[in-house]
Image (tube, rainbow, N blue to C red):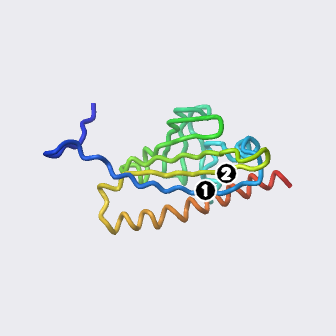
């Protein structure tokens, strides 16, 4: 059983950073998810190798990204999944990510990619550097996902 960090006045709550990237896609949410929702394909949108190494694409499935990151799916919906990093540069910071498609009409959707992690163990300069490294990486990722989803509409 894990114990909370306790100060004189009670538990010290984590100070999670949330980075959300959104982009409109001119394809229905269901069609876009069929094309970009494969859990094992995450590296494709980052320009690195990735693969699902266990599971069937549901909760508990495990993927590797870039040969050095291991992530496990911890939640799944019809047009979404959530994962946590167990091995990699952000694993020690309780890193989680969520990918979701939200229908905005019969032919359009919004892709939302949300990252959150606890930077408590980082110095101030490390905190700023992490955001500066993560935000553009995931903005690029959703751009790449949009291109793949919309290519099917043409």
Percent across and percent down for residue 93 are 37, 51
Q: Left or right: where does residue 71 sit relative to residue 34?
A: left
Q: Quadrant of residue 146?
A: bottom right
Crowdedness near tag 2: few (<14), some (14–19) or many (≥20) residues, C-alpha within 10 Å: many
Residue 28 rendering spot, x and y as whole percentages: 76, 46
| Residue at image mark 2 | 110
Q: Residue at x 13, y 45 (%)?
A: 8
Looking at the image, residue 32 sits to the left or right of residue 47; the answer is right
Q: Residue at x 57, y 40 (%)?
A: 81
Q: How many marks?
A: 2
3D distance between C-alphas at marks 2 and 1: 7 Å
Sooner in the amino-acid sequence: mark 2 or mark 1 = 1
Q: Is residue 121 left or right of residue 136?
A: left
Mark 1: which secondary structure? strand
Could you tell me which residue is drawn at 61 percent across and 62 percent down? 140
36 left or right of 72 in image? right
- Give 10 or 85, whichever is nearer the viewer: 10
Q: Position of residue 102 (x, y in %)?
A: 66, 45
Question: Quadrant where the C terminus lies?
Answer: bottom right
Image quadrant for the N terminus? top left
Q: Which residue is label 1 attached to?
A: 22
Tell me if label 2 and label 1 are in contact, CB under 8 Å.
Answer: yes
- Name the secondary structure under disc 2: strand
Residue neighbourhood size for the residue with mark 1, other residues' Cα within 10 Å, grouped as few (<14), some (14–19), many (≥20): some
Which residue is at a point 37% across and 63% down the rendered structure image?
127
């Amino acid at each position: 059983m894990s114990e909370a960090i306790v100060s004189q006045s009670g538990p010290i709550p984590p100070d999670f950073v949330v980075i959300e990237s959104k982009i409109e896609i001119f394809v229905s949410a269901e069609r876009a998810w069929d094309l970009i929702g494969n859990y094992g394909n995450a590296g494709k949108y980052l320009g690195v190798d990735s693969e699902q190494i266990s599971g069937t694409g549901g909760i508990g499935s495990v993927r590797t990204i870039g040969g050095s990151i291991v992530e496990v799916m911890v939640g799944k919906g019809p047009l979404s999944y959530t994962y946590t990093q167990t091995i990699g540069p952000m694993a020690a910071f309780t890193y989680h990510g969520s990918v979701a498609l939200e229908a905005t009409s019969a032919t359009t959707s919004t892709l939302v990619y949300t990252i959150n992690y606890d930077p408590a163990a980082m110095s101030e300069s490390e905190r700023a550097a992490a955001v500066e490294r993560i935000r553009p990486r995931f903005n690029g990722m959703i751009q790449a996902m949009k291109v793949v989803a919309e290519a099917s509409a043409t």
